[in-house]
Image (spheres, grey):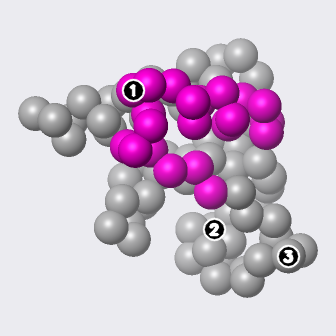
């Protein structure tokens, strides 16, 4: 997962537009896990202005990767319009 997030963070379309934050339940406050009902890791949440703006993704398989990128791109493109 970390390699994939690092790759996405380096994409020109995402730099200064998308922030990836890695939270570890054992090392982080449980607030975010409770607020967004995160039960499994890794989970990708899409949050803007402290509100969830898209459904979360909890599985990292080839299909989920494409869905996560599509969600990010959709959120970026809807912001520009």
62 left or right of 74 in image: right
22 left or right of 41 in image: left
24, above or below 32, in the image? above
Front of the two marks 2 and 3: 3
| Pick the front one: 16 or 58 | 16
Between disc 2 and disc 1, whose residue precedes?
Answer: 1
Label 1 residue SS: loop
Q: Which residue is mark 1?
A: 13
Q: Residue furthest right?
A: 26
Q: Which residue is mark 3?
A: 27
Marks 2/3: CA distance?
17 Å
Q: Residues within 10 Å of mark 3 (few under 14, many from 20)?
A: few
Q: Residues within 10 Å of mark 2 (few under 14, many from 20)?
A: few
Q: Which mark is residue 37?
A: 2
| Pick the front one: 56 or 27 | 27
Can residue 64 be seen by looking at this rendering? no
Can residue 59 be seen by looking at this rendering? yes
Between disc 1 and disc 3, whose residue precedes?
Answer: 1
Q: Position of residue 28 (x, y in %)?
A: 77, 77
30, above or below 60, in the image? below
Marks 1/3: CA distance?
31 Å
Q: Position of residue 78 (x, y in %)?
A: 21, 35
* Span highlighted in magenta in the image: 1-21
Q: Residues within 10 Å of mark 1 (few under 14, many from 20)?
A: few
Marks 2/1: CA distance?
29 Å
Q: Residue at x 16, y 35 (%)?
A: 80
The image quadrant of residue 74 is top left
Between disc 2 and disc 3, whose residue precedes?
Answer: 3
Front of the two marks 1 and 3: 1
């Amino acid at each position: 997962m970390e390699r994939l997030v690092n790759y996405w963070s380096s994409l020109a379309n995402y730099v200064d537009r998308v922030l990836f934050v890695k939270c570890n339940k054992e090392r982080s406050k449980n607030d975010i896990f409770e607020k967004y009902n995160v039960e499994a890791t890794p989970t990708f949440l899409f949050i803007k202005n402290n509100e969830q703006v898209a459904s979360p993704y909890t599985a990292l398989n080839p299909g989920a990767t494409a869905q996560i990128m599509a969600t990010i791109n959709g959120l970026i493109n809807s912001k520009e319009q």
